[in-house]
Image (tube, coloured by chain):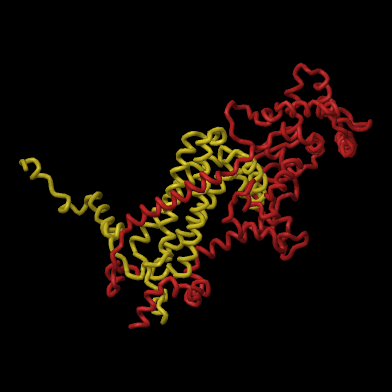
Amino acid sequence: MDATSKEIPHPAAEPANWTLRVRRYIDRLLPMDHLLPDRQPYYVGSWVYVFGVVTIAALVWVVGSGVVLSFMGPQWWHVSGVGRFFNSLHFWSVQLFFIFMVLHLWGQYFMASWRDGRAATWLIGVVIFGVSILTAFTGYLSQQNFDSQFIAINAKDAMNGAGIGAFFNVLNFGQMYGLHVMLLPIGVTFLVVWHIVMVRTRGVVKPIDPEGANRS
Amino acid sequence: MKGVTQEEYYRGVRMAPYDLVKELAIALAGVGVLALVVSAVVSSPDEPPVTISAWVQSDPVDFVTTATGELAGTTTSAGYGQPYNATADAAQKWGPISPQAWLGARIPIDSANTFVIQPLQRAAFGNAQLDTAVKTWQAASADDQGKWTDAYTKALTDAKVADDGTITVADGDYGPLPLMMANLLGMARSGALDGLLQISGRFYQTDYTPALLFMGDGGYLDGLAGSWNLHGDQWGMMNETGQYPGQTWLWLYTMWYQVFPFNSDTGALGLSSANADLGIVILMTLLTAALALVPLIPILRDIPRWVPIHRLIWRRYYSAKVSA
């Protein structure tokens, strides 16, 4: 240590330091041993708990295959065997994502996982489900094949009938494609990260007490 | 448990070793293998899109009937209402609720001009006959136009299609329509109309609203969709072309179109097939809100206590309690 460094106060002694405050808040909110736990309550042994993690795994494959498809452009997979394979990977990853997410949702419902202050975690999960449906819908509209043509023609009535079509034009490929490859995936990913942080912050909920002692 | 730390929440609960990262890695690998294998074995749907050229080559009479309907203002798009035009009483409404009408014609489409007249005007450069025919149509009174389109539409029901794809109808007073439609048919067959409907005054464009609306007015694309079970009354949203799943997660949304009052002409409580889209969107919005707010809704939040599925999920916990 030289003389100069001795003149600078240590951050720990500076309560007005914004960086230190944020770091301390994060440490309090989600310590690393909560984010990446090596121990869990002994009742966390059911297969139902797996549906959440496989949903995340499917999302990783959805995003990964989607990045390749978006990098190569919307025409590529129609004229390339490799492109068709990546489209298939994207298509089936999405199917698996929804299957796992619905199983996760039903599992959490019958575990009443919103108990003990976890209602917001449940609510964000439902929002993820809704935004995922919208993301998949724009994906089906962005396929540039017969399916996307007819889905657009058919779906416009639902959108227009509800007034949504005035701003969300399913016949406009550019708008649907932009939403599908950029804004909506960012939204889903952000919400999933938020959902995971909430789960890891509070930990998994205790089993439903037969005597109702855990009533929220 | 606001303000309660995990350590406090789990106090007295036996903890067991757990490896989250290993579980995630195994899940990634397992889901990846499953997706890769299914992709390699069954691929994915990719039925080529329908072009206007393909429509004309397959069913030229349907094309000309649709184009004539655009001029007559009798097609779906011509009288659609908002957001394409301001046709009176066309917007869906439920009592005083009509967001379709409230938001106005934000995507204006003049079906007759966009789908028929403007493409013909572009083709009329260097074609004096066509130029005269289009001008004759535009200068005619609404009564004359109506008589011509009525007579021509009736005559098209007995139209004959030649080997070269041209169509002929019985002699009659159709004004300039036969010449206009013969030119439009030729443009469509060559593929020129596919391009002309995409012209927006800018070099780049990605909006297919005009071409899709025009094809949606005809019977050809709709017929193909029916053969693939894609119609709304065929649970179409859950299907894709071929033997592939569609958006199966929309099963509940699709189901409402199959049941009363949304599948009925008369309906109940002001809801029927005429405003099914609006009614179902409102219903699904309420159901989604209810799902999100389950933790706050009595009965819905109590069902998990009454249905003993949680006893299967946590059977080790409950068996331990019984032993104790």
For the N terminus of chain A, the quadrant is: top left
Chain letter for red, please: B
Indicate the position of residue B239 as horizontal and vertical percent values. Answer: 63, 51
Q: Residue at x 63, y 36 (%)?
A: B208
**Vertical placement of B224 versus A44: above or below?**
above
Q: Quadrant of residue A195?
A: bottom left
- Relative side of A148 to B17, left or right: right
The answer to whether residue B204 is above or below residue B217 is above
Q: Quadrant of residue B117?
A: top right
On the image, the x and y values in percent for residue A39 come to 28, 64
Does the image show residue B287? yes
* Camera-nearest residue between B255 and A214: B255
Front residue of this view, candidates B13 and B210: B13
Identity of the residue drawn at 40% across and 72% down: B314
Q: Is residue B94 above or below residue B50?
A: below
| Residue A69 x %, y % | 49, 38
Is B106 in front, or is B215? Answer: B215
